[in-house]
Image: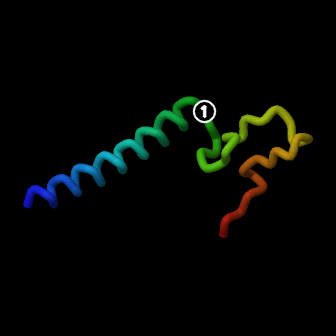
């Protein structure tokens, strides 16, 4: 019984941390959270390709 509560608490903590990260990233203006540069590169000359060109489907 106690093990189940601990497992559920850890899962809730992980999901909560991920949701908080997404919330803060969106609040700070990042357009694409999945990109390593967050679409904040200065130019595309340095090999930066923003999320508008990514299609994961």
- Up the image or down, 30 lies above or below 9; here it is above
Q: Is residue 30 left or right of residue 12?
A: right
Residue that sits furthest to the right in the current view: 45
Q: Residue at x 22, y 50 (%)?
A: 9
Q: Which residue is at the far front?
A: 3
**Which quarter of the rendered picture does the C terminus lie within?**
bottom right
Secondary structure of the residue carrying tag 1 is loop
Residue at image coords 49%, 42%? 22
- The residue lying toward the viewer, choosing from 14 and 19, is 14
State the image quarter where residue 46 is shown. Answer: top right
Residue 12 x %, y %? 28, 50
Note whether 11 is above or below 29 in the view shown.
below
Which residue is rendered at x = 67% and y = 65% of the image?
Answer: 56
Q: Left of 1 or right of it: where is 12?
A: right
Quarter of the figure with residue 48: top right
Image location of residue 8, percent across then percent down:
22, 56
């Amino acid at each position: 019984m106690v093990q189940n509560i601990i497992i559920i608490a850890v899962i809730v903590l992980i999901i909560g941390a991920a949701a908080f990260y997404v919330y803060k990233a969106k609040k700070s203006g990042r357009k694409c959270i999945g990109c390593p540069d967050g679409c904040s590169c200065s130019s595309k000359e340095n090999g930066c390709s923003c999320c508008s060109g990514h299609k994961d489907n």
